[in-house]
Amino acid sequence: MNKPSIYGMTLEQLGLWLEERGHKKSRALPVWEALYRERVSGFEEMDGVRPECLELLKEHFSLQTLEEHTRQESSDGTVKFLLRLEDGNLIETVLMRHKFGLSVCVTTQVGCNIGCSFCASGLLKKSRDLTSGEITGQILKVQRYLDAAGEGELVSHIVVMGIGEPFDNFTHLIAFLRTVMDAKGLAIGPRHITVSTSGLADKIREFADLNLRVNLAVSLHAPNNDLRTSIMKINKAIPIEKLMQAIDYYLEKTNQRITLEYILLRGINDQREHALELAELVGDRRPYVNVNLIPYNPVDEHSHYQRSEQDSVLGFYDMMKKQNVSCSIRLEHGTDIDAACGQLRSKQIKREKTPAV
């Protein structure tokens, strides 16, 4: 049986684990610093850890959970990693370069069951959740890639927007967030982290109650139930009214702004009437909401969807502004390396399944 990843434990959990086995709780700190500050690749590199403690850790944990399968580097500096888990499953992680720093998009599940009709990630149904150690391991994998370049660059931002629905893997997601935010480790501040959800209303409320101060983005993509249900089957179970009630709870509980993600599909949800309806839906929430317009990345299996014309994108943006709704257009990264989530992985799996001739 494979050993669990040590990256799956928060500093508090690691201290308690050591204490239960006869060690001082404080001995977790040098282990933690070795993992996240020195970024060791093996237990034998932990010079500041007592030998008896080190042997115990080696006996029960692993540091190796992710293997690089494929890497693609874009002309704009974006790097997409296809990573193999210990059970052979493949996931994607993406490094993006912004003016404000280096951002990593992480995956939380193997496959996705949300079933958004325009999304590449949902082409492969969910087979399992990632552990918190596997999610954290993605950040460490990217950081070691940066370390090897020798430029002293550090991951500064995280977006939980890769394959899967993060709130469908809630426990491991929260453990991951607590780990990467820890001031004694990677120390990535909560305002530098964004979690995206397709709209699991109960989990939005639970997330609000934790008050982690992490940014929240909700994938809306349509201003009414009929249209949203036609492109996002989750809307049948959680209609817009229920979703907006959860958003109101979040806003009241946290006093933080929220982002509504809106992917623009030509002739489907990108018309003037859709913009007006969306502005009406935002309503009195205007001071606390930003609408993020997302250019559509075409997927072979969803050829009935097309990217909105640039005039439509700008027209939608202008209409939102005229309605006094905060709005932005997402900058694209890695267009030349299949930037849409799931494209690299699904294409690789197809290639591996194609018999030789």
Image (spheres, grey):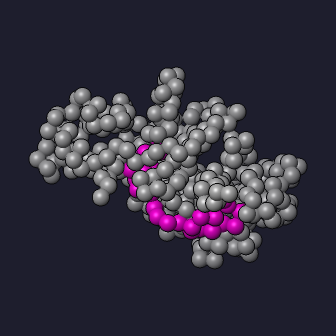
Image location (x, y in percent) of residue 148: 48, 27
Q: Is residue 147 or residue 320 the one in the foreground? A: 147
Image coordinates for residue 300, horizontal then vertical, percent: 75, 59
Q: Position of residue 143 (x, y in %)?
A: 47, 35
Q: Residue furthest front?
A: 357
| Residue 270 horizontal side relative to residue 152, left or right | right
190, 31: nearer the viewer: 31
Report if residue 22 is visible in the image: yes
Quadrant where the N terminus sits is: bottom left
5 to the left or right of 21: right
Q: How many marks?
A: 0
| Left or right position of 269 against 16 | right
Quadrant in which residue 356 is drawn: bottom right
In the rendered view, tell whether residue 112 sits above or below residue 340. Answer: below
The magenta stretch spans which residues?
113-139
Q: Is residue 276 visible?
A: no
Residue found at the far bottom of this picture: 236
Residue 154 location in percent, x, y? 49, 31
Q: Residue at 35% of width from left, 46% of height from top?
A: 7
Seen as rendered, the residue at the extreme right is: 311
**Residue 239 lies in magenta, yes or no?**
no
Residue drawn at 69 percent across, 43 percent down: 337
Q: Is 76 in front, or is 273?
A: 76
Q: Quadrant of the C terminus?
A: bottom right
The answer to which quarter of the image holds residue 198 is: bottom right
Q: Residue visible at 21% across and 50% down? A: 17
Residue found at the very far top of the displayed protein: 151
Which residue corresponds to the image point at 65% horizontal and 73% vertical from the top-left? 233
Give left or right: position of 67 versus 273: left
- Tell me if residue 128 is in the magenta stretch: yes
